[in-house]
Structures are given as structure tokens and as C-alpha cells.
Image (cartoon, rainbow, N blue to C red):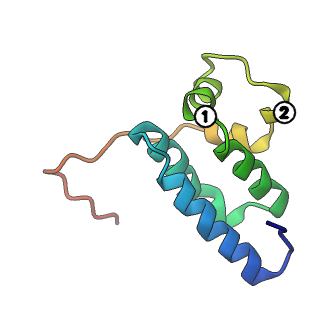
Amino acid sequence: MTHTTDTSDIELWRKRLRFRCWHRGSREADLMFGRFAERHLDQLEPVQLKRLEILLDQEDPSVWAWVVGREATPEAFDHDVLAMLREPMDLSVPSDDEDDTRI
């Protein structure tokens, strides 16, 4: 897919990336990438969107290991988007009893 700076193309690209972030295959990866998307996706520049897209093409256990420092991050992935993924985040899952409304 060729990405241009056209606003509608970028918004469509963001929408697809947001979906991919929330549908990874494991709850941990969904929360890590999904909450990242909610915090940062709308502010990412096209080059950062491409970096995120490339990270999403990697295996979840590898990215998780890089984020938590369990494995050394390969140089190609040691960039600003991975640094944003490393920022403290709430990975807790709301229980069924909790009211999940946000103020």
C-alpha cells in the first residue's frame, strides 16, 4: 500500500492500524498495542505510522520481549515508536463487575 500525505488516506491508514492494534490474537498484545493506539495513533506522523505497521508485522512474543526488556531490541526496531510502547501503561483488564465507563 502506498501511503501519501493526503488526509483521507492517512485517516484510513490510522483506522486500519487501530483495528490491527486491537486484534492481535492475545489479550496482552491487544491491550499493549490497543492502548498505545488510543494514546498515540492520532498524533503519529506518516513515518511513525510506517514504523508501527512494521512492528505489527512482527510476532507478538518478540515485540513483548523488546518492550519489557526481556530481549535486546534489534537495531531496526529500536526507534521512537517502540519507545512510546515502553511508556508506562495500564494493562489491567476490567472485571465484569466493574463499571467500564470513562469520565
Q: Alpha-carbon neighbours of circle 2 within 10 Å: few (<14), some, or many (≥20)?
A: few
Residue bearing the label numbered 2 = 76
* Residue displayed at 69% across by 43% down: 55
Residue 49 % position (x, y): 75, 57
Judging depth in this view, the residue of 3 and 88 nearest the camera is 3
Residue 6 % position (x, y): 83, 81
Res 31 label? none
Amino acid on which the number 1 mark rests in the picture: Glu
| Quarter residue 80 falls in | top right
User: In the picture provided, is 47 more to the left or to the right than 37?
Assistant: right
Residue 46 % position (x, y): 82, 63
Q: Disc 2 vs disc 1: Cβ atoms closer than 8 Å?
A: no
Element under disc 2: helix
* Residue displayed at 64% across by 46% down: 56
User: In the picture provided, is 92 more to the left or to the right than 53?
Assistant: left
Residue 64 % position (x, y): 57, 30
Residue bearing the label numbered 1 = 59
